[in-house]
Amino acid sequence: MTVPRRFVEVGGRQVQYRTAGDGPPVIVLHDVPGSSTQVAGIIEELAGTRRVYAPDAPGHGLSDAIPGRDEMSGFVESTVAFIDALGLGRVPLVGPGVGGLLALAAARTDPHRFPVVVDRTVRMSADRRERLEVEGYPAFSPRLDGAHLASVWHWVRSRFMYRAPDGRTADDRLRMDLPSPGWLSDLAVEILRRGPEYAGLARAALAPDPGPTLRILSEEGSVQVVEFGPPEAPGGMLAEAVAASSDLPPAPPRPRQPEARPGVISRRFVDTPQGQLHLRQSGIGGLPLLLIHQSPGSAESLEPMISHLAPDRLVLAPDTLGNGHSDKPPVDRAGIGYYAGVLSAALDGLGIDKVDVWGSHTGALIAMELAVRYPERVQALGMDGITLFDPAFVEEALANYFPPLKPDMHGLHLLRAWLIRLDMYLFWPWYNHTAAGANVRPLPDVGALKQWADDLLASGRSWRVAYRAAFEYPTRDRLPLLTRPTLLATSPVDPLRFYSEEAAGICDAITVAESEGYVTPEAARNTAELYRAFFARTDR
């Protein structure tokens, strides 16, 4: 079951939520750390008879954090405000794991309005709560050698094997099925993305004794404590408990997603026939500018470019299908034309007829194909790199470049992804571990490497689809069909810089220049100014 995602504005913050089904409403609050990704099984079970809403907690998943606020009071206020923004009155709250403690805290604000269904872990002993709060959430500081990944994976698995993640004794051991490697990997990636703040809300939820709240809600007849079952397949008891918790009218229509506005980067989801695209947006007015990131990666790497380009126009930066936070593609193989078609459909969904387009590496090829296939939609084109690989290199790359990143019960895929991203800095191509393949570049900053590796892990099985399409793209055949004004600018350290002059010799529409890339803030500002001037000349 595919569960659509949306954003809603709550008190100046953006909250991502998953929603499915029709009928009376129910709110599902995920365990922490984690996100609404981890409650997909609960959503599927309840969506047969209910309209389910599952928000990401503040600072988790894609929901904005609440800076400078106490974790618990901020969570409770934001949850109630989220429910108000949906236009809901009385609605049951469902919470697995620590999410049950969060549900109890929210329900205490109005026991009649918020009946709750929680699992039995809310009745854990004070000793166990204290042990979890104090010792159960170690730091996972990223290291250039990737050693932190083994610690994260061990911690994630141990949550389902021991009563506390640092458990060692036979009494600590739990008897339950481990979630699938894919489910565990999603949780590990959420923790890695969240960084050192991943445990804050969990610790805050574990600190108070839930006993008084349980007694108050019991007196109101508005709490049920049940066995949820495995996180991926909770079982029928949960649906029965929610059905018994309230008799409510059908939920109202879902609210509109946020619009773009100047000075901030907001987000939304765009529906296409191939799946949902996660979109960053900023600015208003002018001819819209579409930015397309390289693969593997996401539009997060383009946020400095978005900020510099958006003051006088609308800028849109989607995560391409299968990358970042967009849906996985429904196919295992696709060409660059497939991705161009998805973006054209996204523009249709946004009601946009014509754009300027800029793309980096794989994104540049997608941008080029968009201009070739839909010339009426593209005013001008900016390209950060182009590929003109010879057939022998393409054959070699297709055989070596794309090892699978299928989640593994021992977490081996985490380190594989990390080292692939590291080697993409150090070698070209990354698998050529010889003197001839060495890039003359410094070691990357561990924070930048972490962002790229997180994006690669989030792409998972689909990381190869768009990237492979770039190697297979018949650039020489398509270049003569490009008629839109094009600026092809690469940095002096870009391994694709050697193809720029050849591309300009094939296509008269291309002008070649040198850029500073966009890895550092200053470089992004200067590169944005280069393309801003180019688009200003062509948008007349």
Image: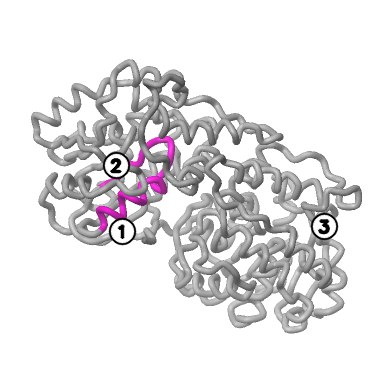
| Secondary structure state at the residue bearing disc 3 | loop
Q: Which residue is the site of mark 3?
A: 495
Q: Residue furthest right?
A: 436
424 versus 256 height, above or below: above
Earlier-in-chain disc, 1 versus 2: 1
Q: Is residue 537 magenta?
A: no
Which mark, by number, is residue 80? none
Q: Amino acid at mark 1?
A: Ala
Q: Amino acid at mark 3?
A: Pro
Give the residues drawn in magenta, as a range: 27-47
Give the image quarter of residue 471: bottom right
Q: Residue at x 39, y 22 (%)?
A: 172
Q: Residue at x 50, y 37 (%)?
A: 191
Which mark, by number, is residue 20? 1
Give the image quarter of residue 293: bottom right
27 versus 508 height, above or below: above
Label 2 crowd (10 A; few <14 / some 14-19 / many >=20): some
Q: Residue 1: x percent and y percent?
A: 36, 61
| Secondary structure state at the residue bearing disc 1 | strand
Q: Which residue is the site of mark 2?
A: 229
* Horizontal relation, residue 500 to residue 278: left or right: right
Q: Residue at x 26, y 48 (%)?
A: 235
Earlier-in-chain disc, 1 versus 3: 1
